[in-house]
Structures are given as structure tokens and as C-alpha cells.
Image: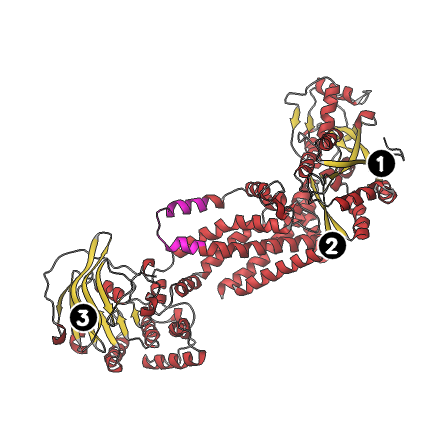
Amino acid sequence: MTSIYDIHDLTVAFGGRTVLDVHRLAIGTGRLHILTGANGAGKSTLLSLLAFLTPPTSGKVAFDNAPVPWGSPSLFRLRRQVTLMHQFPYLFSGSVFDNVAYGLEVRGMAAAEQRHRVAEALAQTSLTGFERRNALKLSGGEVRRVAMARALALRPRVLLLDEPLANVDHETARLLEELIATLPKQGICVIMTTHEPNHADRLGGRTIHLVSGRVVQADGAAEGPEPVAIAAAPVHRIAATVSTL
Amino acid sequence: MGFIAESLATSAALIVSLDPEVFATVTTSLAVSSCAIVLAAVIGVPTGVAVGLHDFPLKRAVITLLNTLMAMPTVVVGLLLYGILSRQGPMGPLGLLFTPSAMVIGQTLLAVPIVANYTVGVVQGADPRILPTALTLGASPLQGVLQLVRQVRFGIIAALIAGFGRIIAEVGVAMMLGGNIRGYTRTMTTAIALETSKGEFAFGLALGMILMAVALVINLFLNTLQQR
Amino acid sequence: MKLFTRFALTLALVAGLCSAALAGERLRMSTTTSTENSGLLKVLLPPFEKRYNCTVDVISVGTGKALKLGETGDVDVVLVHARALEDAFVAAGFGVNRRDVMYNDFIIIGPANDPAGIKGAKTAAEAFKRIAAAHAPFISRGDESGTHQKEKELWKAAAMKPAGSWYVESGQGMGEVITMATERRAYTLADRGTYNAYRSGKTDLKIVFEGEKGLFNPYGVIAVNPKRFPHVKYDLAMKFITYITGPEGQGVIASFKAHGEPVFFLYGPKGR
């Protein structure tokens, strides 16, 4: 089993407060990982780091066995292999097609192939026919599904999902759950956060549990869990800063 | 009251007859101010975006400076540039004084602080998810910033409208740097100033009404751009 | 956004092309606001522009600034009416080839009932003395213009310095000053041309004193010194001077009328 992420002695601190403190964490390719923990435990920050949007304050992060070039202009190439879907996704103004094709557009993909990929992604999220719809006039569930399609269209190696099943109607939640379950078989490494314990049980995969910024329990035999003492440190959830550009 | 009615009648007559001198002042005003707002956008929008997105030690001071520059009297800008562009000044050999180019330079200087300042506000007030979303979808830093600008274009166009409003209506810079030369650097505003100095109040007001009509048409046009 | 940019740039380009396509060379002339406002230049310049395929850019400002533009080399030729200042301008080496062009005169205007009783005065200086004695309101140009220079000359001839709340230094052009004097029921020294333009409808002030030699207002044209400012269009400026002092230009000046009356007068063949 290869690790796509290899993390050593990672800390992330904002304004003097340590939000993440992970001694050792390895994340394997082509698997589903479920990141659990209470609100404020550092899940979103960890996802943001794995998306290369938030740099570490200290520590080593390797992606695909190479050290991550934080602060370098070439960092965006790594970002093109990893896509993060926010808990409350932001859809760009314009049509659903514009949104789903955005990532393809910035990668310079030809129009015809863009159409093909978009149709494919919309089909996966049961949004066929939604191309021309105004992205700003969708229901909550539709927004989540468009964001999912937008990420899937890119066929990323790693898909990071922040609370993908929270705050949506039952139908959408079921659809997304089924979809997420199929992704590892397509070779996509999926890391999703949730604060509901049943999700982990239903979806299977490996659980990484965070408490106050520290990995308390990461089960899954091959990686070696790291039981670590619990500390109580206040945490913040911050979006990407310009320093990661 | 009668003099306002007289002005309305005069302005209508001038428009209908396409009086060549009035027409020349209108095209000069539009050409100069359009050029200037385009240049101001090229300078001001990236500046505003850069200041808005970055945190740096002098950020507060820079924003305060921009605020102050927005309120600079047009005659002061005119005087400063006059000293620079006159033959006696450092840029004298270019012979720019009393040409439309000098007016464009002056009006650009007036508009840049407005455009930059409003852009800073727009960028700072933008949804903080925009940039991370673009980046995680694979945008390069430049592509990400462009997408941010595209998402907040409504506010940025408002900045340009504000800047344009200020410069199409100003007299100080146009007069000092253009010289109000008939058929060359005479704008609607300098023509109004001239007519007023000749005591032709009704005619001056008529020109003023034409100026307002032109400004209205421009703003309607810019407004439709905003809605797109 | 792109549409607007294209529209604006096209407009600017068109404007730029138009002005470039405009008759070949540009001759820059500074003159006074009263000269341009008289309307003379609108008829005097076109024949010259046509003959030499050029455009004359007229920058009309106060006398002081008109000469200053010559002193900084920002114009090629100067047309003003302030003899003392013109002589100083030439003496200091800023200008060459000063020529007389035309003249008109100043008049003292005031309320029809003439509260200071200057109608009977023998000289303009005496009229001024009477105004001061009566503390009648008087608006001065206060802007170092040709008119203002003349006013100062007259106060000097009257051997007095005007001071007091009755004497108002406005710092504005002739037209504005006439308007102000009309509002304040005051006297002022004005050039006949501007007064004529205001006489019907813009002012109810009347001419209360005129015709004296001391009120003579001569106009001079001066080329900016090419030795001082090599970039000035000296040849074209000299062509212009030759034109307006020659038979064709003088003919236009003599036949120019405003409100039915001639505005400017010529010197005889000998000049003054």
C-alpha cells in the first residue's frame, strides 16, 4: 500500500494558537479515509493543508514521495492533482456548465472535451440537463451536487470532502453517499470529514480521529495508529491565505 | 425660472441642429475621459486587488493615502501637472501641455485613487471562499485572482463608473492642462466655464444639460454591462 | 468589460486621428480672454490657417498668464494689450518683433444715475478721483490684466491709492466684473468690446465716461524668442505677424463688427 501523503511532525498555528499537531500520519492511495472529530477539532484545517491551501507552520509533508514545495510558484501543479469541496461550497456566478468546466478551463482543455467531461460529471451526480441552469438559483442539495460534479470533472487523484453529507436533504445525502463509496474503486483517494459516527460505519474505509488538533486514533492495520495524549487547545477555521499562492 | 426654460430650449435646439462646436466639445469630453478611465482601470484595478489581498505593514497608511487622494481638488492636480508638463518643467520637451494627451494624463491621475480605493473595498468584502475555490480547482495564482475579479466585477464596474463620473464632470484639470482651445481641447465643462465667464448663463446651462444627458446615456450603458 | 474598452479606445483613437489629421502644423498663440471673447479671432484666423495649411491653437487667459506662457516657451506667439508689460517682455529677451496690431479703448461704466457725478469730469483720472471721494462702489479686475494695468495707471495719475470697502478687487475676467458691478450698482473700468457684448440684456450700467486719450488700449503681437526657445515655431509665428499687420489681416480687423459697431481700430499707415 503506497502512501500518497506522508506527514511528519506537522504543526499548524494561527496567531500563536496551535490548531493542528500531528506527529505522524500516512494516507494511502485509492482508499476512503474518514476524518472524524468534534467541531473545532482541526478537521477543516487538515483538509485545507492536504489541499495545499494552508501551509504548515512546521513539519514535513510529502506528496507522492516528494516534499511539498510550500511557497513556491509551482505549488499550483500539486493543487491540480488534489481537489477540495468546502462544507458550504461557493459556486461561481454563471451557469452550472461554467462552474463544472472551470477547472478544465484553467487547465486549457479544449471545448469539445470540456463538454464531454462536464456531461459525465453531471451524470454521476444526477444533474444531467442542468448545464444551462443559473448556478446562483439552485437548491441546497443541487449546490452540493454541482460542487461535487465540479470536483469530479477534474478526475483528481485525491478528493477532499468537508462534511459532504451534512446539511442536505435526505435524497441528496443518499445519492452522495453512494457516489462516494464508488470513488476509491476508480482509484481516487477520498478523504472526507464528518462529525457523525455512523457515516464511518456505513461507508467503511479507515478512520482518522482528531481531538483538539491531534490524531488520537487512526485505525487501519497497515498504517500503524498513533495514540497520542490529548491536549486542549482552541482552534480556528481559516480559509486559504494569499501566502499559499 | 425663465432662464431655466430658456436653457432647456437652447439645449434642445443645439442637440437637434447638431451644432458642430457643441458636438466637438462632446466628442472631446468623451474621448478624453474614456481614455483616462481605461488607463485608470489598467493602473487602479490591479493596484486595488494587490492591496486588498495582501497584508503588509503599511497597508493602513496606503489605504488612508488613497482616501486622501480621492478628495484632491482638481485644480491642485492641474497645477501640479502643469508644472511638470510645461516647457519649463521636467517633461517639457515632450510638448504635451495644451493637448488632449495632457488632459488624459491629468484625468487618469484623478481617477486612479477612486478606482483603486473602491477596488480595495470590493476585494476585501468579497466572499473569502472565492479564491480558495478557484485555487483548489486548479487555478494558477494569476488565474485565481482573475476569477476573483470576475466574481466581483459588479463592484469593480461601480468603481469605474464612480471614477468616470468624477472626471467627465471636472473642469480644473481640463482647463489648466488643455487650455480650452476651441476645436481641440475644449470640453463640455471648459465650454460651460467659458460661457459663464462671458455672462452667457443660459447657454452655459444648456451645455450643462447636454453634459448631464451624455452622462446619463453613458451610465445606462455601463449599467447594462454590470447586469451581464 | 471588453466591449466598453474597445468602444472607449476606438473613440480615443478616432479623436486622436481627427486632431492629427487636422491641418498640418499647429501654431500656439496666447491671448487675453477679452480678445477671444470679442469674436474677432473666429474671423481673423481662418484665412491665415487656410493659406498656410495650419491650425492656430488659441489659449485665452488673463494678460499675466498669456505673457507667462511666452516666458516659459509654452506658446509661439503672444497677442495682448498691456504695453508696459509687453515692453518688459521684449526687454527681458522673451519676445522679439513686437508690432502694433490694433487698438480700442476703455470706458468707465456705472449706474445710470451716476452717484459720484463723474459725467462732467475732464479726464479719466479726475473721474476716478470723484469716485473715490464719493466712496462709490468700484469693482477692480485685480488680476494684473491689461485692463487692470490701465486702471492702476489712472489711479496713479489721480495721485491716490484706492482703499476702503467701496473698492473691490475681484480677481476675475472682464465679463464677470461687469456682472458683479451690475449687481452691486458699481463703477468699473471696462474695454468697449466686452461692454458692447453685455450692453443688450446682461447689464443696465451705462457709459459714464469715455473718449479721453488716457483710455487708449493698444494691442501688440510678439513672437516668442527662438534663440531662447529653439522649439518654437518662429517662422510660422512671423508669417502670422505679417498677416495680421498686413493689408489682409488689417482689413478683417477693420470690418469686424459686434452688435452693429466696430470693435477694433487700426493705426494709420505710419502707426503710432
Closer to the camera in the image, B208 or A57:
A57
Q: Residues within 10 Å of mark 2 (few under 14, many from 20)?
A: few
Residue B132 seen = yes
Closer to the camera in the image, C245 or C156:
C245
Amino acid carrying label 3: it is: Ala
Does residue B84 sit above or below A51 in this rendering?
above
Contact, mark 1 vs mark 2 (Cβ under 8 Å): no
Q: Which residue is mark 2?
A: C24
The mark total stands at: 3
**Residue at horizontal 71 percent and vertical 48 percent from the top:** B182
Local secondary structure at mark 3: strand
Does residue A223 sit above or below B43 in this rendering?
below
Closer to the camera in the image, A175 or C239:
C239
Q: Which residue is mark 1?
A: C265
- The stretch of residues the image draws in magenta is B47-67
Local secondary structure at mark 2: loop
Contact, mark 3 vs mark 2 (Cβ under 8 Å): no
Residue C115 seen = no
Q: Which residue is mark 3?
A: A26
Closer to the camera in the image, A211 or C128:
A211
**In the visual, does A125 lie left or right of A233?**
right
Q: The residue marked by circle 1 belongs to what chain?
A: C
**In the visual, does A93 lie left or right of B220?**
left
